[in-house]
Image (cartoon, rainbow, N blue to C red):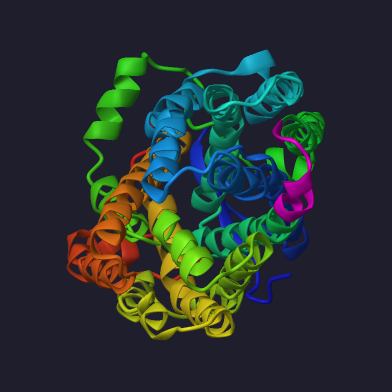
Amino acid sequence: MNATGPTIALEQDHAGARPRVLSNTVRTRIVLYLGGLIMLLGLGAPYSGMIDLPISFFLKNKLHLQSHEVANFRLLSAAPLYVSFLFGFIRDTWNPFGRGDRGFMMLFGAVASALYVVFAFIPVTYITLLIAVVLLTTAFLFVSSAQNGLTSAIGQQHVMSGQVSTWWNIFASFPLVAAYLMGGVLSDALEGKNADQAARVLFLVGAVVMACVALYGLWRPRSVFDNIVDEHPDRPHPLAYVRRLLTHWPIYPALLIWFLFNFSPGSQTPLQFYLQNTLHASDAQWGQWYAIFVVSFIPTFLLFGVLCHRVPLRTLLFWGAVIAVPQMAPLAFIHSMNQAMIAAAAIGLMGGVCSAAYYDLIIRSCPPGLQGTTWMIAGALYYVGARFGDILGTNLYDHFHNFNVCVIAITVVYALIVPAILLVPRGLISTADGEAPLVETPVP
């Protein structure tokens, strides 16, 4: 799968850490295992893709909510996401069934599946839908924290953060593309059914996906779990974890960049209303637009995957950010859905390198043993930025009745990322993938 030769892992024994070579076969097995898990979670997440898209259509088409009301629902239903760092901290300090991340998959995959079944048979109202999304998100975040922590730990310990970032983004794109295609079509197909029937079909699909996640946790491939070092075997007091996290400077600029990238005022609810109300897109076309947008990231993800072995991360960060500053500008020049589809492809291509570089940066910035917490902080910032950016963008759109105002706002925010890169420790990003960063991070 990768033609760049073996990477070096750090294997701990009683004498300390020593380098060990991982074969291409082992690395391929690791990537495939993580890819399967990432794709399952991408389909089962109650707050994105296949589940979230029909919900947004339900709110708009069946409950007849205005754009700011849909944005407010998203803001409220995302409440667990704002504190998702707590789920990451639990992942880093708790070991369910003595099976680590697999224990989280088995336990909370089953819990999420059961919740999906329960809400499939409860009459749908605004309130019940809000409660369903909040509870499902809470259960799901335990599984998500396990996947995030496991993936990041592998990238760090094997000095392959660029490879992991590349394939993480690519595998995450597949379920998003499928979800947006199926979600839009599913919404159109369910348009003739009553709300309860539509919700039952949607939630039962979610239940099946999360049951598969629970079963996935039973699988323990040796190529994955025999190549992970336990970075906190003595399990220190939780306050020691908090102290080490707060005093770890590299995470701050990485998280700032991540927040700015996801604070894009107008790229969600206002864009949906603009395409559907102004350009008369159907639900399926809205799903197709997002599918094209997501799949168009993949070529530049692959470009990053090639370059990250040859070019220091600093260079990829800078030029990726510069290219992404005008990412949403094509939307200012569209007047039909056909033009919008072409714009979606251009927007996706412009965002791939920077997105993969930001993942790489966060992986490198994680304090060892606290990968789950760091990534769930990043997850919280993603949704805080996305939801509050959505509120700001919606207010701008409702006030000016012109989507170009949102395009300008997004461009200004993205331009702030370029100077923020100067805050990143140079040694952390001065090496290519497969080379240990020059900023040493002590292992607890």
x%, y% of residue 171? 66, 59
Seen in the image, is 26 located left or right of residue 409? right
- Residue 211, percent from left and from top: 79, 30
Main secondary structure of the magenta stretch:
helix
- Determine which quarter of the picture holds residue 297: bottom right
Q: Quadrant of the N terminus?
A: bottom right
Residue found 66% across the figure and 58% down from its top: 180
Q: Nearer the viewer, residue 419 or 239?
A: 419
Name the spot of residue 67 as percent of width and height, x first.
41, 50
Q: Is residue 423 left or right of residue 223?
A: left
Q: Residue 176 or 99: which is nearer the viewer?
A: 176
Q: Residue at x 58, y 75 (%)?
A: 296
Q: Is residue 31 one of those drawn in magenta?
A: no
Give me the residue at 63% from left, 25% from top: 100
State the extent of the magenta-drawn residues as a range: 186-195
Q: Is residue 221 visible?
A: yes
Please, is residue 89 above or below residue 75 in the view? above
Task: Examine the rendering and report whether any part of residue 435 can be seen.
Answer: no
Seen in the image, is 358 located left or right of residue 100? left
Quadrant of residue 412 in the image?
bottom left
Give the camera-side residue of 392 and 375: 392
Q: How many marks?
A: 0
Quadrant in which the C terminus is drawn: top left
Using the image as rendered, state which of residue 374 and residue 277 is in the foreground: 277
Residue 109: image quadrant is: top right
Which residue sits at x=53%, y=34%?
Answer: 145
Vertical arrangement, residue 102 with respect to residue 339, above or below: above
Q: Provide residue 267's location: percent of width, then percent of height.
A: 41, 61
